[in-house]
Amino acid sequence: MSVEVTHLPSGLTVVTDAMSHLETASLGVFAGAGARSEGEKEHGLAHLLEHMAFKGTRTRDAKRIAEEIESAGGELNAATSGEQTAYYARVLKEDVGLGFDILADILTQSVFDSDELAREKNVILQEISAVEDTPDDLVFDMFNQAAFPHQPLGRPILGTPETVMSFDRQAIQAYLDTHYRAGRMVVAAAGAVDHDRVVEEAGRLFAHLPEGSGPEPASAIYRGGEDVMETDHEQANVLIGFGGRSYKDDLSPALGIFTNLVGGGMSSRLFQEVREKRGLCYQVYAFQWGYADTGIFGISAGAGAEDLEDLVPVILDTVAAAASAPTEAEIARAKAQMKAGLLMALESSAMRAEQMARHMLIWGRPLPPAELIAKIDAVTADDVRKAGEAVLASPPTLAALGPVRTLPRLDKIRSHLAA
């Protein structure tokens, strides 16, 4: 592998992977702070900061930021998650310096102009409204709030209209100064890059980042619960969940395999039983999200009102059967899918940069592909059973919206699982 890591005196980490066959580079600055780093009165602030970073600095206004990167054929983007916020640039190899200069500018020299702030608040209000008009997005917000009630991890990342409108320049700057510190940030680059040059650029451009790591995010505890909303949509969107595992947990690889064989593809148990055999829905799949100290396992399905009463018990029975008796063949198939997905992702410079940065923030080092594959290969059928049984032993979560009058509610789900 061509991965190199340098820790600057400030605490900032630089990680690169030179992919010599590429003519482009993917660059990123990753902060180990996201929505769960927000205080109660800061709900939505991490996401607002991500938006405002592109709205003008001491040397560039918003239009110039867009024109400079696009005049070089590049692109900029950003994303806020529960535990991280990422700022990306994709450029030709000769424009790596420009890409880093713009990323550093928006993260260290933003002015948070009041007029721009007012406009961007309105943009986010429209974004919130778009989610509320999109049932298969809204149901995930409901799901998180039911699973992690009264906790930052359970709150919608976008915030609420009330919290978004309450923020001013001082609030944004305070969040930035508190959480965007060198010890909790990673500069990552993959593709047509030279490690020494990236280190030199990072040291110069991010020299004034505050040192240290800032406060740890609030802890999270999966609790489970219910949030069901009757609407006049044609189809009901249903999520059923259980406690998962932290990505640092020893059972995490086994839970990944369990998730895959339950609902990871067309050969999975849920797809075959719920869609192919019974025709109860068009789409059904399983997922797991790991966090630093907790996790969640879930099943997503959409169905008409006439099928809900049959759909839920079939899902529960299918998951329970997989937990009690996963077969060697489906475990092998799930392992193959996971390894292929991992290796395919390595062929993308953007995915590679993101993966390295995530590893640095979680484990303090980039995990070699061979190590990741070895973790998958080491999982046994007994490990998969343990992972599945642990999931079903946790309190269930139910979130749904649409024509849900016939939907079995949480008490019936608990009774069915107990039986």
Image (tube, rainbow, N blue to C red):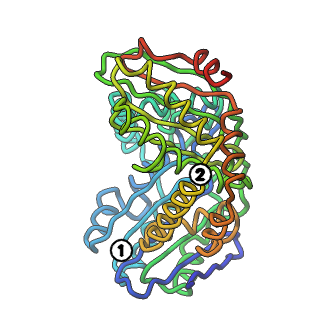
Name the amino acid type tagged 1.
Val
Q: Residue at x 47, y 47 (%)?
A: 268
Name the amino acid type tagged 2.
Thr
Secondary structure of residue under mark 2:
loop
- Of circles 2 and 1, the one toward us is 2
Q: Quadrant of residue 181?
A: bottom right
Residue 115: x percent and y percent?
A: 37, 42
Residue 128: x percent and y percent?
A: 39, 33
Mark 1 Cα within 10 Å, few/some/many (few <14, many 20+)? many
> Considering depth in this image, is 267 or 141 the residue closer to the camera?
267
Mark 2 Cα within 10 Å, few/some/many (few <14, many 20+)? few
State which quarter of the image contains the N terminus. bottom right
Question: Residue at label 1?
Answer: 91
In the rendered view, would you say 81 is above or below 133? below
State which quarter of the image contains the C terminus. top right
Secondary structure of residue under mark 1:
strand
Question: Is 157 displayed left or right of 387 in the figure?
Answer: left
Residue 288: x percent and y percent?
A: 57, 45
Marked residue nearer the N-terminal end (2 or 1): 1
> Considering depth in this image, is 131 or 371 the residue closer to the camera?
371
Q: Can I make out residue 282 in this image?
A: yes
Q: How far separated are the C-alphas under marks 2 and 1?
A: 46 Å
> Considering depth in this image, is 114 or 374 the residue closer to the camera?
374
Q: Which mark is residue 327?
A: 2
Q: Residue at x 47, y 64 (%)?
A: 341
Q: Residue at x 30, y 69 (%)?
A: 68
